[in-house]
Image: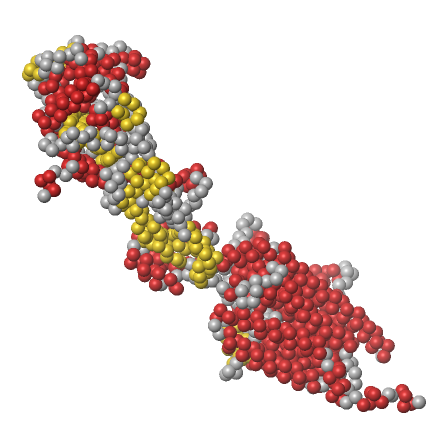
Amino acid sequence: MTESLSLSDVRTEGRLKIVVFSLATGFVILSLRLFQLQVIHGSEMLRLAELNRTQTISLRAPRGTIIDSRGEILLDNAPSFSVFYSALSITQEEQAAVEKELVMWLPDRILLIHRKMGEARRTGKTVRILQDIPRQPALALIEKKLSLPGVNIIAEPKRRSRFGLFAGHLLGYVDEISPRELSRRDSYHLGQTIGKSGLEKVYEEYLHGLEGGLRFEMDATGRHVRVINQILPKPGMNLHLTLDRRLQEAAERGLQNSSTGRGAAVVLDPRTGAVKALASYPEYNVAESVASLLVHPDLPLFDRAVQGTYPIGSIFKIIDSAALLEEGQWDPHRVIYCDGMFRSGKKDFACWKKHGRMDFWNALVWSCNVYFYNVGLYLGPDRLEQCAKMFGMGRRTGIDIPGESAGLLPGIAWKKEVARSSWFDGDTVNFSIGQGPVLATPIQVAQLMSAVANGGVIWKPYVLQRIVSADGKVRLQNNPQKTGTVSLAKETWERLWTGLQRVVVEGTARSVYRADLAVGGKTGTAQNPHGEDHAWFGCYAGIPGEPPSLAIAVFVENGGRGSAAAGPIARSIIEAAFPSPEKKL
Amino acid sequence: MTLAIYPKRVEEESWLKRVLRRVDWTLLGVMLMLIGLGVVFIYSATAPSGHSGDYLIRQGLAAAAGILLVLLLSILPYQVLRTYSYGIYFLSVLLLLAVLLFGTRLRGTRAWLNFYWFYFQPVELTKLLLAVGLAGYVDRSLFDLGRWQGLFTPFLMLGIHLGLILLQPDFSSTLVLFPMAFILLYTAGARVNHLLAVGALGALSLGIPLVSTYLKFSEFRAEGHMVRLWIQQAFVETNAPFFQFWLGLCLLLVVGWWFLRQWRIVIPAFYLVSTLMVVVVGVSGSFMVKSVLKEYQRKRLIAFVNPTLDPQGAGYNILQSEIAIGSGRLFGKGYLSGSQAQLGFLPERHTDFVFSLIAEEGGFFLALIVLGLYFWIVWRAFDIAYMSRDRFGRWLAISIGSLFAVSGLVNVGMVMGLMPVTGLPLPFVSYGGSSLVGACAGIGILMSIHLRRYVL
C-alpha cells in the first residue's frame, strides 16, 4: 500500500512537471504572439489605428475670380454646403437609417445618395456624397448630426456667376473631374472640380488653387471628436480680362432680342487688339444635360464668335475699296448705272436694289453690288485676294481661346488646287461682294474693322489682360501683339475712313450714327445656301480727334438685312461704351 | 545531548512569527500588483465615459472584500474543504440553478443574481467550488482513476456544471472548466488514452455545433451531388436529414462493432460507448446551439474561425483588439492616450479586453510584465501543489492553478486573436467584483495550503 502510494505520488510529480511545462509553453506562445503583434507588425497596426482614428476631408480651394477690365467681378465663389460621409465603423443598419434621414431632407437626390454612400462603404474613404445642398436642409442636418453617424456637413466654395447666364462660351464652366480627365492629370483626384470649357479650362492651372485638408479625430461611432490639423486651401489666381461687362451685356441682350436669337458679336479695341466683348448666342445652361444641348437645333454649345465661319457679304466691299483706292487709277467719280442686274459670261448677278447712277462713294454708302462687280473685275482676283490676306482673311487671328476657325479665303491657286477648276470672271464677281467660297469668323471681321480703324495694324486679339495671384503678384501679363500690317498709303486710309463714315451718316449703316462720335461702318447681307441671309454689321467708333477705341463686328445668323438685324445691336454696344448725353440725364 | 537536538531557538519563536515567516509573500505581492494594475487601467478604460469614479469605487470595494477573503481562507485549515467537498459541490449546483431560476438577464445572458446594490455572477465562484468538489472526489477515489469507470463521476460532476452554465448561455466558462478537470485528472493519474477519448468527445460535441453554424453562415451552398446536399442538410438544419444522418451513423457504428467482434476483432466496449456518446453529445449540443442561441451569438462563436464573416460584429472586436495591442508597440502610447481605447474602438476595454488596453497604453514591455506576473501566480500554485503537505492540498492547488492558467491563456489568447471571443475576464485585472472575489478566494486557499505545508 505504502509502496503503491509513493509510486502514484512520483507519477503525479512527473506529470505535474509536464503540466507546468505545457502551461509555460502556452505563456511563451502568448509572449511570441505579443511580440509578433507589437514589434513585428507594430508599425502596420499603428497605421491601422491612425486610420481608425482619423479621417481626412479635402477642402476645396476657392477658384480664382474672373474680373473684367473695369474691375467688375464676373465669376467668384459662393459658400455652399456639401455632405461628406464615412462608412468606417458604421453598421449596415445604421447606414440605412442615415440614408433614410438624408433622403427625407433631400428627396430629389435619392439616387445620388444611395450610390455615393455605397461607394463610401466599398472604399472605406470619406466621400463627398452631395454638394451644393440648399441652406434649409443643410442647417437641419447640422443640427441632427448626433443622430447621423459618419455624416459631416461642410461649407465649401462653389462657382458663382454674378450676372447669371453671361459670356458662357468665353468664360466656360466647371464641374467634377471625369475619370477620363483624371487619367491625364496626376495632381488631381476624384471629386475635385475642374474647368470644363472656355477660360475656366484654358487657365485651369492658374485658377484652381491648392486644395486644403481637414484631419479629424473620430471616435468609434464616427463622430468627430476634434480637428487634429487643418491645412487651409490656397485660393486660385485671379484672371483680369480685357472684357467690358457693359459691352458684353449689351451684345448679349442685342443678340437675344434679334429676330432669330442666334449670332455673335465681337468688340475689339483697335488700339491694342484687346477683346472688349465676345458674345455668342444662344448661351447654354450647364445644368441642362449635354445630350439635349447637343441635339438642340440652335446649337447652343457652338461658339459662333470664334468657331463659326460664314460668308461675309458686303463687308468685303471694305477690302474692295481699300484695294481700289490704293491702286489709284480708278476715278471714284466714275459713274456706273445699276439696273439691279449684272451679266458676266452667261450668268446674271443681282444687286439688292435698282440703284441707278452710282459713283464709287455712293456705291459704298448704298452698298451697290453692280458697282463693286465692276471694281472687282477691274482689280482682278489676285489683287483682291492679296488685299484680303493683308486684312487677315483666311488666317486664324490667334485669340487666346481654343477652337478658333481660320475661315476661307479663295483665290485662283486655291480653286485650282481644291476645286480643280479654273477661275472664271463669275468667281471674281462673287468674290468682290464676299460671296462664293469666301468665309470668315466674326472675330476675323472684328479684326478687319480694327485694322481699318487703326490704319492698318493687325493686332492679335486677346481676352486675358493679366493673371494676379491671391497675394497680389502679377503672374502673367498679356501685351498687345502685332501679327501683321495692312500697308496702304496714308491717303488711302483717310479716303476709306471718309467713305465708311459716309455709310454711317447717310447710308445703310445709319443705325449707328452718333453726332458726338466718329463712327464708320459697313453692313453686310450674306446669301447662304442653307436658308435666310446672314446679317452682318462691322463698324468702328471713337471720340472725334482721337484714334477710334471700338471695333465691332455683329453677326446675326439668318437675320436677313444687315442694316435692320445687326445694326441695332452694334448701336446698343456703342451706347454701352459711350452713353449718350441725353441718356445720361 | 537530547537538548542539543532541539535547539532553544526554535522553541522560542512565537506562533505568529512562524506563521508570518511561512506566508507566501510573493504570491500575495504579485496578486496585489495585478489588482493594482487592473485598477489603474480600469480608470483609463472608463475615463472617456466620465464615470470612472464609480468603477474605481466598485472595484476597490471588491478588492477589499477579496483581500479580506484571502485573509480568512488563509486562516481556515483547507482540510475542512475536503470534509465538506460534496456539500460544497452541491452548493455550487444550487447556485447555478438559482441563477437560472432567479437570475437577472443582462446582455442576453442569465448569469447574474441581483443583490439590490450589486450584481453577483455565481459562475465566477462555482468554478472554484467545482475545483474543491473535484479535488475532494479525486482524493477519495484516487485508485479508481486508472479505470475508465472511475472517470465517469468526475466528468458527470463537470458535465452538470457545464450543462447548467451553457443554459445561461455562457461558453467561456466551458473553455476553462474542461481543461481544469483534465489537468487535475491527468496529474492524479488517469490514463492518457482515456482522457484523450473524453477530450475527443468534448471537442466533437463542441465541434459539431460549430461546424453546422459555420456552414449555415458562410454562404456555403452545395450544388450537385445528392449525397453531399443531404449531408450538408443534416449539418445545417434540424430536419429529417438531420435525424436520418445521425441515427444512421449510430446504427452503422453498432453493427460494425458487432460484426468486427464476430470476426474476432475485439474492440473494447469503451471505445464504442465513447464514440456513441460523442455523437449523442454532439448532436444535442448542435441542437441546443440552434435552439438556444440567437443568431449574433452563433456568429460570435465562429467569428474566430472566420473573422471576415461579420466584420462589424464579432470579428470587428478581435480586429480592433489586435490593432490596439499592435499599435502599442514597444513602449506603448502612454497612459490615457491609447487612441483605440479612448475613442471607443476597443470593445469591453475595462472587462474582457483590459489586456489589450494595457498593451496599447503600456506597450510590449508592460504587457510582457503582466504575462510574467500572471505566470508567476500559476507557477506559485503548482509549486505549492508540489510542496503541499497532503494529497488533497495538492489536488486543490493544481485545480486552482489550472483555473488561473487557463483563464489567463484563454483571455489573452482571445484578445490577440488566438482563441474565440467568449467573454472571459482576466482574473485580478478585469473589472468585475465576482471575478475578483472568486480569484482572491483561490489565492486564499493557496495561501492556506502553503502556510500548512509543515505542521503548524
Whether residue B212 is visible here, answered yes or no, is no
Q: Is residue B395 left or right of residue A387?
A: right
- Asked if B201 appears above or below A236 in the picture, the reply is below
The answer to whether B14 is drawn above or below residue A341 in the figure is below
Asked whether A522 or A301 is in front, the reply is A522
Q: Looking at this rendering, what residue extends furthest in the front direction?
A: A545
Q: Quadrant of residue A303?
A: top left
Q: Is any part of residue B195 visible from this angle? A: yes
Residue found farthest to the left: A356
Q: Residue at x 20, y 15 (%)?
A: A326
Front-most of residues A366 and B190 = A366
The quadrant the C terminus of chain A occupies is top left
Q: Residue at x 72, y 68 (%)?
A: B195
Q: Can you give x and y, in whole percent of width and height, for residue A168 in the image?
A: 27, 39
Rendered residue at 35%/52% (across/down) = A156
Pick the residue in front: B146 or B24.
B24
The quadrant of the image that shows the N terminus of chain A is bottom right
The residue lying at 18 percent from left, 18 percent from top is A491
x and y, in percent, of residue B405 in the image: 67, 70
- Residue lying at the far right of the rendered structure: B1
Residue B154, quarter of the rendered image: bottom right
How far from the left and from the top, in percent, is residue A101?
35, 60
